[in-house]
Amino acid sequence: MLWLKAFHIVFVVTWFAGLFYLPRLFVYHVATSDAPGRARFIVMERRLFILMSIGALLAMLLGTAMIVAAPALLATPWMHVKLPLVALLVAYHAWCYRLMITLRAGGAGHSQRWYRWFNEIPSVLLVAIVVLAVVKP
């Protein structure tokens, strides 16, 4: 179980690195007006999205493996709150993908300011999920 937990944490960190940085790339992408700069951001965003998707998939697989190994976790109140928050993260991840596709197609989608605020969502979810997993209120 400790090995599952250790690697779950590693891939959660990988996932969150992408969730924190991809929207920041969106801010810079929207601010860029030259074609070579936009092309560079399209490549960076795509590569980062692939890496963070791998991190997300492995984090979820290892989290599922921990629940399979210890099904009693599903009976804990903190897990009843954590799992919907993880579902929100997955939805945020999918939203990032849609925004990336919009930017790739040449649309701005939103302002730099909007992307800066959008970038704060995973921070709030991270704090809530870590507190739930560690403190187990």
Image (cartoon, grey):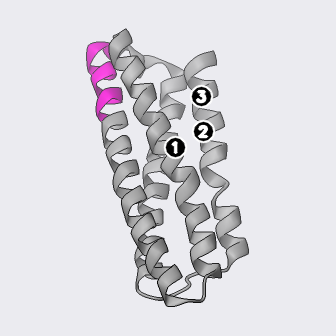
Say which residue appears at 67% left-offset and 80% top-offset: 111
In-front residue for pair 121/17? 17
Instruction: Check disc 1: other Cα within 10 Å, few if <14, some if 14-19, many if 20+.
Output: some
> Which element carries disc 1, helix, strand or loop?
helix
Task: Note whether residue 24 is visible.
Answer: yes
Instruction: Check disc 2: other Cα within 10 Å, few if <14, some if 14-19, many if 20+.
Output: some
Task: Note whether residue 136 is visible.
Answer: no
* Vertical comparison of 50 with 33: above or below: above
At label 1, which amino acid type do we have?
Phe
Say which residue appears at 59% left-offset and 28% top-offset: 130
Mark with earlier residue (3, 1): 1
Say which residue label 1 marks: 16
Residue 27 is covered by the magenta coloring: no
> Which element carries disc 2, helix, strand or loop?
helix
Say which residue label 3 marks: 130
Say which residue label 2 marks: 126
Image coordinates for residue 68, horizontal then vertical, percent: 26, 20
**Residue 34 shown left or right of residue 53 in the figure:** right
At label 3, which amino acid type do we have?
Val
